[in-house]
Image (cartoon, grey):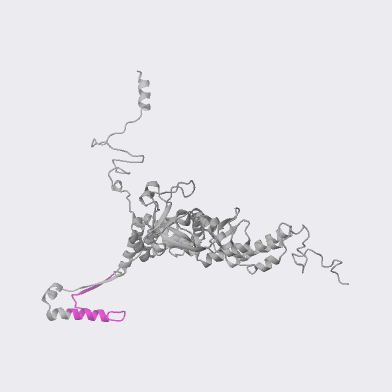
Amino acid sequence: MSRKNRSNRSHSAPAKTAAPASGKAWSVGDSFANFEARVGYGTGNQTSSSGYQFDFISRNRVLLEAMYRSSWIVGQAVDVVAEDMTRAGIDHEGEVDPGDTAKLDREFERMGLWDRICDTVKWSRLYGGAVAVMLIDGQNMATPLRPETIRPGQFKGLLVLDRWLVQPTLQDLVQDFGPDFGMPKFYDVVADSMALVRQRIHHSRVLRLDGVDLPYWQRISENLWGQSVIERLFDRLIAFDSTTAGAAQLVYKAHLRTYKVEGLREIIATGGPAFEGLLKQIDLIRRTQSNEGMTLMDAKDEFEAHQYTFSGLDNVLLQFGQQLSGALGIPLVRLFGQSPSGMNATGESDLKTYYDNVKQQQERRLSGPITRLLQVMFPSVLGGPMPDDYNFSFRHLLQLSEVERADVAAKNTETVLSAYDAGLISQQTALQELRQSSEVTGIWSNLTDELINAADDELPEIGEVDPNAQGTDPGQTENPQSSEGAPG
């Protein structure tokens, strides 16, 4: 072989990694590592001893309840998202009479359904799962729900039961393809429940909500429930509370005073008049020492004052608070009620991002349960099944200012009137649209059902309505100066 070929071969051959001097076999992962400098995971440094383990906080009901009752941060973590998911309600869509939707909304308020749904979300976040049982008078809870059999007034509300008040049938699962496939077919109420004691409830009669979704094997270990939202941030919560308590303890040591007494040990050991005189002297110093007082002491005694500075503690607490905020997906301004800092910081962008996350949680976790609830409410409240084209959407959580409400109201009114002037909608439909917009703007809320029903429901012909005509009723279709109505 020529020298040139040997040279090419030496450059093209892969370089061999030198074995460590100890001669041991090392298993190198798919990451950067420097064994000589002990840099990287698996190189014998302290980081290599780190790892993760299961806490299983979700299984400790008593601990979760103690944290919820005693820690305001845990209370905020559980309550804030649940309350925001349910505080604005829904908007009804589709070919449904506005009067019927108003009846549905009134029943939601009368039965406190949004409060019950909020409680279901809360306990699902705290315990990892909860159900809301639909109470239908006169029906067997263990049978599948058939909305077509519900009579008017038969639905009586919701009963909220957390995961510790019901026992799912783990060996009898839903086999029908659909959103409930693989879930427990029945829920047996335990004896400690406040109602429906020892009754079996069919899965179609409950609104089930889970906490944090888990992979298959972990879900099995939790009896097919989810995980508490507290479990993931447990270590960060301990760090935050420990730092807060430590900072509070430093307040007691913020101002320390020391007093050096010559022969203190002998005075204490001897006792008697000498020790009593020392105590009287210290008490005199304590009572007279002030801005205008004078401290009297022996010439050989020394008095010193030590002060502690708290600089940097606020940044440490803020960093731990930000970790909790990120773990929960709740901005600081909503979780801690803390005003945003920084130039031109208003917190609006943080709240908008948070409300978008709440919207996503509503669509994912509440759409199905509320649809099932409305399938029961339609025949019970309105006496008929839910229309096929009916739909609903969750209302926006951002609150409009007075100026923004007025601007939106003006644009909505202009849009409705333009559609009416173009002959696209009738006067009755126009009034219905204006009243429906009052839920957002607060304007046109006094349009009653009688006024709407008395309006013309026929589509006007194009050009029949003159929007510039003063004193003309938009629903008037006849010329007041016609030969039939003209004065003689």
Question: What is the span of residues highlighted in magenta in the rendered image?
Answer: 278-306
Q: Position of residue 206 (x, y in %)?
A: 46, 57
> Furthest-left residue in view?
270
Q: Position of residue 249 (x, y in %)?
A: 30, 67
Locate the C terminus by quadrant.
Answer: bottom right
Residue 158, relative to residue 181: is it above or below?
A: below
- Which residue lies at the image location 84% right of the left edge and 67% below the top edge? 481
Q: Position of residue 174 (x, y in %)?
A: 44, 48
- Which residue lies at the image location 19% right of the left edge and 75% below the top edge? 301
Q: Position of residue 24 (x, y in %)?
A: 24, 36
Look at the image and tell me whether residue 332 can be seen. Answer: no
For this rendering, which residue is in front, 30 or 450? Answer: 450
Left or right, 406 with respect to 138, comes to: right
Question: Is 245 a magenta residue?
Answer: no
Question: Is 279 a magenta residue?
Answer: yes
Residue 449, relative to residue 50: is it above or below?
A: below
